[in-house]
Image: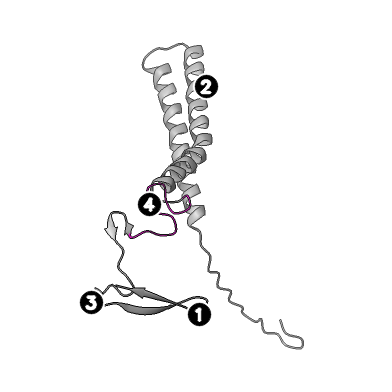
Amino acid sequence: MTPGSDTIETWTVAIDADISGLESQLKVASGAGRQFASALVGAFEGLVVKGKSFGDVLSGLAVSFSRIALQSAMKPLEQGLGQLFTGMLSGGFGGGSFGFANGGAFSSGVPVPFASGGVIQSPIAFPLGGARLGVAG
């Protein structure tokens, strides 16, 4: 309210945020929740339908929960190692494991075009740093 008036000011706040990380974590949590639910349903089915003893059902449930917790804990490590190996194979370590240092004439088996990609018909001079002159062709 503003001083001396009986009106209420309306404020609108717009929030623009990247929530992709949150969405991926929610998917992981949702998957873990489904796994826990499936383990509980399987345990109940084993108790009621298959006639398993209560002790067998509890031990099986404990193993299932341990497996789910271990898989969830190892997921970041699995993703990190996957990214590491992908980076190594695609040239993530200083110019690539299978390429040339400082950029070669080939990229993924394809020649890299010079300048704007044209074919040089005759020798062409071009400026280099440090007041030097380069020649191509």
Decide: few, some or many residues near mark 1? Use Cα within 10 Å; few <14, some 14-19, many ≥20.
few
> Depth check: 102 or 17 in front?
102
Residue 102 within the magenta-colored segment of the rendering: yes
Which element carries disc 1, helix, strand or loop?
Answer: loop
Q: Position of residue 22 (x, y in %)?
A: 51, 53
Q: Residue at x 50, y 59 (%)?
A: 19
Note whether 39 is above or below 33 in the view shown.
above
- Residue 111 is drawn in which quadrant? bottom left
As measured in the structure, the alpha-carbon distance from the residue carrying label 3 to the one carrying label 2 is: 75 Å
Residue, disc 1: 131
Mark 4 and mark 3 in contact (Cβ < 8 Å)? no
> Depth check: 69 or 83 in front?
83
Which disc number belongs to residue 121?
Answer: 3
> Depth check: 79 or 67 in front?
79
Which element carries disc 3, helix, strand or loop?
Answer: loop
Q: Residue at x 31, y 54 (%)?
A: 108
Q: Amino acid at mark 1?
A: Ala
Q: Position of residue 72 (x, y in %)?
A: 50, 36
As measured in the structure, the alpha-carbon distance from the residue carrying label 1 to the one carrying label 2 is: 73 Å
Q: Residue at x 49, y 14 (%)?
A: 54
